[in-house]
Image: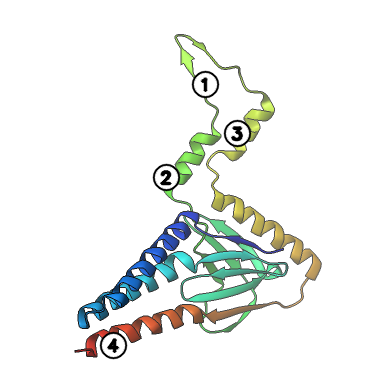
């Protein structure tokens, strides 16, 4: 079963941008005025490339056999058994020992673009995980929490969605290592050909806008 993690806000905003671009492209084609229209189309194309590679393309995908990290310009496929460690700060970093093949190296560390945790999100998680009591005068107005509830709150204190995803990656990696033992594993790195194709199309529009009289 495949699971995909993205930045939800960036993904939604990117689709709003695409709808905006589609409307404007339709309008520019219907009211074509020569060079001015071509320049406007080229500007929209360049901005759309940026939106695509930063907001639409990045994703972290769990498959049965591997972790797929889709970053703006590369796709890295790391078998679960190749993952040695996972650290979570602002981003999730995957430390792996598998031998790599494909375009570009990553020095044994894959930094995932999504999900990320901002300082604001982590502070919010910290507040959410701590017990709260509303006071009126000298006495609390809410009943005291049980030990189990307090333990759950302490366990959740400061934990974000990125921390939760990092835990899922660790669990899958440990289970895979128990199954495969010391068998060699291969990390595959490929260029983001979809992003390259979109950038090439935008470049073609920019050149056309320059040469059109």
Tags 4 and 3 touching, CB below 8 Å: no
Which sits earlier in the primary sequence, circle 2 or circle 1? Answer: 2
Q: CA distance from mark 1 to mark 4?
A: 64 Å
Which sits earlier in the primary sequence, circle 3 or circle 2? Answer: 2
- For disc 4, the marked residue is 208
Residue 94 lies, in percent from the top left, at: 58, 65
Quadrant for the N terminus in the image: bottom right
Residue 19 lies, in percent from the top left, at: 41, 64
Which sits earlier in the primary sequence, circle 4 or circle 2? Answer: 2
Secondary element at tag 2 = helix
Q: Residue at x 61, y 19 (%)?
A: 144
The disc label shown at residue 133, or none: 1
Secondary element at tag 3 = helix
Q: CA distance from mark 4 to mark 2?
A: 44 Å
Tags 3 and 2 touching, CB below 8 Å: no
Quadrant for the C terminus in the image: bottom left
- For disc 3, the marked residue is 153
Question: Front-most of 63 and 183?
Answer: 63
């Amino acid at each position: 079963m495949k699971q995909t993690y993205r930045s939800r806000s960036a993904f939604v905003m990117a689709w709003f941008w695409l709808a905006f671009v589609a409307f404007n492209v339709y309008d520019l084609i219907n009211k074509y005025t020569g060079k001015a229209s071509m320049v406007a189309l080229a500007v929209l194309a360049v901005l759309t490339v940026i939106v695509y590679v930063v907001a639409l393309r990045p994703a972290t995908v769990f498959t049965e056999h591997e972790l797929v990290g889709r970053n703006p310009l590369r796709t890295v496929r790391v078998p679960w058994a190749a993952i040695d460690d996972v650290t979570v700060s602002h981003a999730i970093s995957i430390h792996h020992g598998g031998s790599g093949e494909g375009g570009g190296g990553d020095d044994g560390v894959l930094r995932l673009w999504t999900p990320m945790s901002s300082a604001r999100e982590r502070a919010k998680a910290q507040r959410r995980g701590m017990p709260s009591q509303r006071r009126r005068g000298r006495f609390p107005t809410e009943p005291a929490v049980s030990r189990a509830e307090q333990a759950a709150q302490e366990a959740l204190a400061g934990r974000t969605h990125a921390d939760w995803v990092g835990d899922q990656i660790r669990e899958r990696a440990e289970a895979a290592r128990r199954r495969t033992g010391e068998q060699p594993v291969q990390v595959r790195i490929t260029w983001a050909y979809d992003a390259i194709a979109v950038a090439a199309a935008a470049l073609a529009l920019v050149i056309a806008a320059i040469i059109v009289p």
